[in-house]
Amino acid sequence: MRNILGLIQRFYVFLLFLVLQGFALFVLFENNNFQKAEFLTHSKDWTGKIYSWRTNLKEYWILDEINDRLSLENAILRSRLPENMLVINQDQYRPASDTGAVQRYIYRDAHVENITLNRESNYLMINRGSIGGLKRSMGVISNGSIVGIVSSVSDNFGVVMPILHSKFRASVRMKGSRDYGLLAWPGGSPEIADVREIPKHVPVEVGDTVITSGFSDYFPSDMMVGYVESLDDQPEENFHRIKIRLSTDYRKLEYVQVIEDLYKPEQDSLLQEVQSLDAVNNPN
């Protein structure tokens, strides 16, 4: 109470001015219809602006929540696409309505917590870990374009090796010709990568689309990779030198989806069995 009285005593002149100014305005608007009408008009304008500012501020604070919800919905919807199903039984005598398709790929959303772009071996950190179903070697995409591969996992976070990493490799193909190549990043720009091992007899033009082949363990087929930016073929070489512009914009990357292949353990087990038999039959 003493502090309040001290404050009033210190600023009493200014407070008295405010009181007298308010009283003068009240008398002015109360006894003059024109000024009263003008005041009411402008006060409504300011009230509307204040409400608008308050609404915009409220929407800004819940923007992250909205984006999280949209990211989750996108992951769920992508999981339901026909290309993420596996047809187990292709018996032609089965009814058309009974395709025997079962879920093969499922998608889980995640938020990018950290990212590097200016190193030889860059990385992303996402806010999903083993508790959220994340495992090593899972593919990571954003808006249908490949981002990278999960390389390390803790309980609540995961580290992703993006395309922008010296050790990243993925099988890709030209969308038009369907010929296969290898995706690698030469360093430098986070927007440009190389496609290697496309033979020169394959026609390639600037603007051609590059997609995933489906041969890797990480990504389904036909995921977007990028577009041919330039060709720098050398006469003595048998393969194109292709530069592509990546369809993933890493500078704006916020939300991603992690891909789980539900049949990968079965495939891995089968391959291990074959490799074990080869080792037994060919000990040398």
Image (spheres, rainbow, N blue to C red):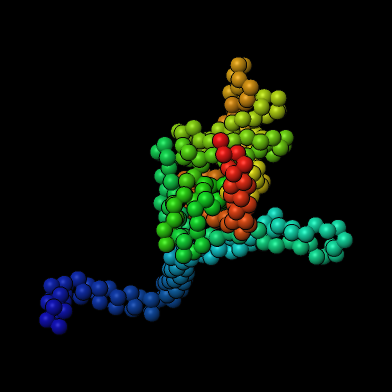
User: In the rendered image, is residue 275 in sight?
Assistant: no
29 to the left or right of 193: left
Q: Position of residue 118 (x, y in %)?
A: 40, 39
Closer to the camera in the image, 168 or 232: 168
Q: Residue at x 65, y 46 (%)?
A: 214
Question: Which quarter of the rendered picture does the N terminus lie within?
Answer: bottom left
Closest to the observer: 238 or 282?
282
- The one nearer the camera, 166 or 35, is 166
Question: In the drawing, does residue 128 fall left or right of residue 236?
Answer: left
User: x, y (%) of residue 168?
Assistant: 50, 40
Please tell me which residue is depicted at 35% across the width and 75% down the height of the picture. 28
Identity of the residue drawn at 59% across and 33% down: 195
Which residue lies most toward the bottom here? 1
Picture coordinates of residue 140, whole percent (x, y): 54, 51
Residue 265 sits in quarter? bottom right
What x and y, as percent, mark residue 86? Answer: 71, 57
User: Would you place residue 184 above or below residue 81 in this image?
Assistant: above
The answer, for residue 40, to whether it is visible in the render is: yes
Q: Quadrant of the C terminus?
A: top right
- Figure check: 262 above or below 15: above
